[in-house]
Amino acid sequence: MCGPSECSAMEGEQARRVGRLLGEAGVTVLCGGGGGVMAAVAEGASSAGGLVVGVRPDNDRGAVCAGLSAVLFTNMGEARNAILVESADAVIIIGGSWGTLSELALARHRRGIPVISLGGWQLLDADGNPLEATVSAIDPADAVSRALATG
C-alpha cells in the first residue's frame, strides 16, 4: 500500500477501507508506517485483525503510526521505497506525492506485479499521450479485488 503522508479525508477513508478489506482477506499489508494514507491503511487492516508491516525510511521510533504489527527501520530514506515495492505481490496506490510517484515507478520497473490506483498520478508520454502505468480502480473493494486476483 502506497500513498502520501498527508492526505485528504476521502483518501484516508479509502485507505482505511482498503486496509480493512485486506485485513479481512488475511493478507500481510506493507506500508511506509507513517502518517496519512499509511496510518489509515494500518488502522483499517489492524482493526480487522490483519498483519501490518511498516517499512520506515528512518530509525525514528516516534514517527511510527499506530496499527502496525511490526516495523522495519531501514534508515535508508527514500531508498526504502525499493524494499517496500520489491516485497509486495501487488501495489495499491491512493493519492499522490513525490514519494508515491517513486513507488509507482519502482513497481512498474519491477514488472510482473499489478499497480492499482485509486486516484493519484496520471502519467503522460513525451507526446502527451496517457500511459497505462496503473490499473484504475473504481473504489476500495475493486482495488482489493484486483490486488488479490494476482496472488
Image: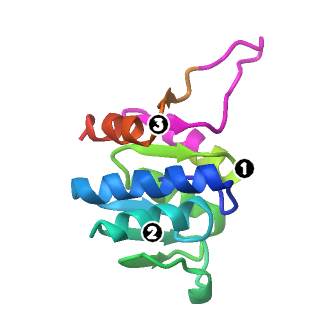
Residue 149's x, y, as percent? 26, 34
- Tell whether label 2 touches label 1 (CB within 8 Å): no
Labels 3 and 1: the sequence-earlier one = 1
Name the residue beneath numbered marker 1: 98
Name the residue beneath numbered marker 2: 43
Amino acid at the residue labelled 2: Glu
119 with respect to 148 (left or right)? right
Labels 3 and 2: the sequence-earlier one = 2
Q: Residue at x 49, y 41 (%)?
A: 107
Please name the predominant secondary structure of the magenta segment in the image: loop
- Location of residue 5 with respect to 69 vertically, above or below: above
Amino acid at the residue labelled 1: Trp
Name the residue beneath numbered marker 3: 139
- Tell whether label 2 touches label 3 (CB within 8 Å): no
Which region is colored magenta? 104-131
**Residue 85 versus residue 5: which sits nearer the camera?**
5
Labels 1 and 2: the sequence-earlier one = 2
* Residue 109 among those drawn in magenta: yes
Helix, strand or loop at label 2? It is helix
Helix, strand or loop at label 3? It is loop
Q: Residue at x 54, y 68 (%)?
A: 39
Residue 46 sits in quarter: bottom left
Task: Sort mark 3 into few (<14), some (14-19) or many (20+) by Cα contacts within 10 Å.
Answer: some
- Is any atom of residue 139 visible in this view? yes
Residue 144's x, y, as percent? 36, 42
**Residue 37 versus residue 1: which sits nearer the camera?**
37
* Residue 66 among those drawn in magenta: no
- Is any atom of residue 32 visible in this view? no
- Location of residue 117 with respect to 81 vertically, above or below: above
Q: Residue at x 64, y 39 (%)?
A: 120
